[in-house]
Image (cartoon, rainbow, N blue to C red):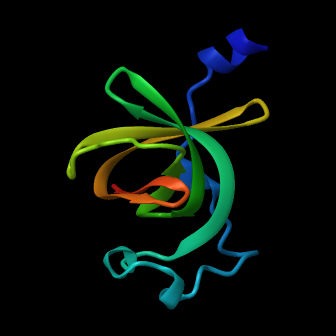
């Protein structure tokens, strides 16, 4: 099965959004700089890929223009840096490239706001 997953091309993360059947987050729940597109709450395990390094993350919300992820511990990524996020659900893999818009330490670890 792993070889089958590796040979198939990952789908875009924004394909995890279903606006026809779910409500987006309310504007007050979303940071000001991320209000350009609607965001949908998620709690999906994933991987943040920065160059050759991989960090476990949780995708907290996903929209057509970006994602917000939380990494346990400290992850330092400069603003503007291009990174990738991968989420695997069963046999399906979702992956996309983003630019770091915000990176801040929180009580949960490091929160990164990523945009396309």
Residue drawn at x 68%, y 20% is 5
Image quarter of the N terminus: top right
* Front position in the image: 94 or 106: 106
Q: Position of residue 37 (x, y in %)?
A: 43, 75
Q: Position of residue 53 (x, y in %)?
A: 39, 24
Image quarter of the C terminus: bottom left
Residue drawn at x 62%, y 22% is 8
Depicted 32 relative to depicted 16: above or below: below
Residue drawn at x 38%, y 41% is 75
Exactly how many numbered labels are in the figure?
0
Going by the image, does 86 lie left or right of 114? right
Depicted 83 relative to depicted 29: above or below: above
Q: Position of residue 12 (x, y in %)?
A: 53, 45
* Front position in the image: 103 or 96: 103
Q: Position of residue 95 (x, y in %)?
A: 52, 38
Going by the image, does 62 lie left or right of 49? right
Q: Quadrant of residue 34?
A: bottom left
Going by the image, does 49 lie left or right of 21? left
Q: Quadrant of residue 50?
A: top left
Residue drawn at x 64%, y 55% is 16
- Residue projecting furthest to the front: 107
């Amino acid at each position: 099965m792993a070889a089958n997953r590796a040979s198939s091309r990952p789908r875009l993360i924004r394909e995890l959004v279903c606006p026809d059947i779910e409500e987006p987050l309310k504007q007050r729940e979303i940071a000001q700089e991320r209000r350009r597109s609607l965001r949908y709450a998620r709690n999906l395990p994933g991987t943040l890929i920065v160059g050759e390094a991989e960090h476990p993350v949780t995708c907290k919300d996903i929209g057509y223009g970006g994602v917000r992820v939380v990494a346990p511990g400290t992850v330092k990524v400069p603003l503007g840096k291009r990174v990738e996020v991968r989420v695997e659900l069963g046999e399906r893999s979702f992956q996309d490239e983003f630019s770091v818009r915000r990176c801040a330490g929180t009580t949960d670890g490091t929160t990164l706001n990523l945009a396309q």
